[in-house]
Amino acid sequence: MAVSQELKADAVFEGGGVKGIGLVGAVAVAEEKGYHWVNVAGTSAGAIVAALLAAPSGLNRSPDCYITTA
């Protein structure tokens, strides 16, 4: 009998401007693998990613809504 194990993780994201884009990609892959976030925190760009994860919709939006052009 297989036992289903829920994958839970805490995450702390650091800042770094463009690194925030990489964080979004890494989080998206982790979520595809079945991870669910329990506690999230971050600084600078990492705080933005953490806030998006904490929001009810999480990262389950079109990537286009996060990109704007001047």
Image (cartoon, grey):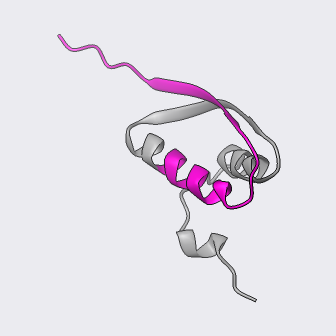
Instruction: Name the spot of residue 38 as percent of width and height, x first.
Output: 63, 28
Q: Residue at x 46, y 43 (%)?
A: 31
**In the rendered view, does 13 fall on the left or right side of 47?**
left
Residue 66 as seen in the image, left or right of residue 60: right
In the rendered image, residue 39, in percent from the top left (x then y), is placed at 69, 29
Tell me residue 46's x, y (percent).
Answer: 73, 47
**Which residue is at a point 37% across and 19% down the rendered structure image?**
5
Query: Over which residues does the magenta segment extend?
Result: 1-28
The residue that appears at 70% across and 49% down in the rendered structure is 55
Q: Is residue 6 above or below residue 28?
A: above
**What x and y, as percent, mark residue 56?**
66, 49
Write down the quadrant of residue 13 in the picture.
top right
Split into 4 quadrants, where in the image is the N terminus? Answer: top left
The answer to if 44 sits in the magenta stretch is no
Residue found at the far right of this picture: 44
Q: Quadrant of residue 57?
A: bottom right
52 versus 69 height, above or below: above
